[in-house]
Amino acid sequence: MEKLSLCLLVIISLSNAFAQTDMIGKAFVFPKESENSYVSLTARLTKPLTAFTVCLRVYTDLNRDYSLFSYATKTQYNEILLFRGKTAVYSISVGGADVIFKPHQSSEPMHFCMTWESTSGITELWVDGKPMVRRSLKRGYSLGTQASIILGQEQDAFAGGFEKNQCLVGDIGDVNMWDYVLSPEEINTVYAGGTFSPNVLNWRALRYEMSGEVYVKPQLWP
């Protein structure tokens, strides 16, 4: 009987760890520097990605390097990476290659959407509803599906290899991902608070697990 109770407790704990949660109006809060505080997201992927859009909001006053979104596979740790450098530039990595963007800086919460498509390699970064000049990388590439998706840290190994000086200190929320490129009109709708049924990561039905000192709190943006 005790073994049965223990098994049920383990099953319940595992199901709760990655239960779907409606995160509307909430944000993950990383209150201090740490090499072991992060959020792991579970995606719905059935085939290699040949395009994607990732959108999210971030509120931080950091002036150093930090990771906003890290998608790693066992063969490529920077399969998808959105990273802010200490010189106030942002890089998007796909398949280990990266391109640089130089958007405006703001002390307010910022909204980002990054897109990529394999057929042309065209890569876009939208900041607060405004597009940066397009770049191109990894034309013809496809992204692996057995992924570790991490918020708050950059992965220098699969689901690990974190560094304290690259962690996020601040809030992150409204994280959504699609397996196709949203149109400019759709991206502006997402920026304004709308959605288009995200089919990889859905903030309104998010599966996640928090590790270390991370909290779920009401969002600080409208």
Image (cartoon, rainbow, N blue to C red):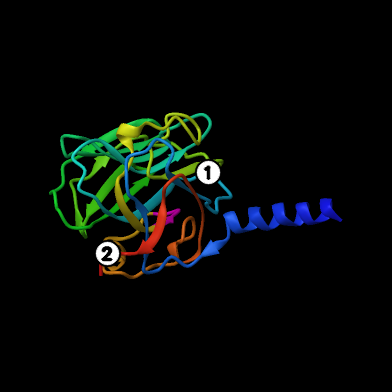
Q: Which residue is mark 2?
A: 220
Q: Is the residue marked by circle 1 packed among few (<14), some (14-19), or many (20+) residues within 10 Å? A: few
Seen from this angle, which residue lies furthest right? 1
Main SS class of the magenta portion in the image: strand
Res 102 seen here? yes
Marks 2,1: beta carbons within 8 A:
no
Residue 8 is a magenta residue: no
The structure residue drawn at horizontal position 46% and vertical position 30%, both measured from the top left corner, is: 76
Q: Is the residue marked by circle 2 packed among few (<14), some (14-19), or many (20+) residues within 10 Å? A: some
The structure residue drawn at horizontal position 31% and vertical position 35%, both measured from the top left corner, is: 166
Mark 2 residue element: loop
What mark, if any, has residue 48 been given in the picture? 1
- Residue 130, x across and y down, in percent: 18, 57
Mark 1 residue element: loop
The amino acid type, in three-letter code, at marker 2 is: Leu
Question: Is residue 165 shown above or below 168?
Answer: above
Q: Quadrant of residue 156?
A: top left
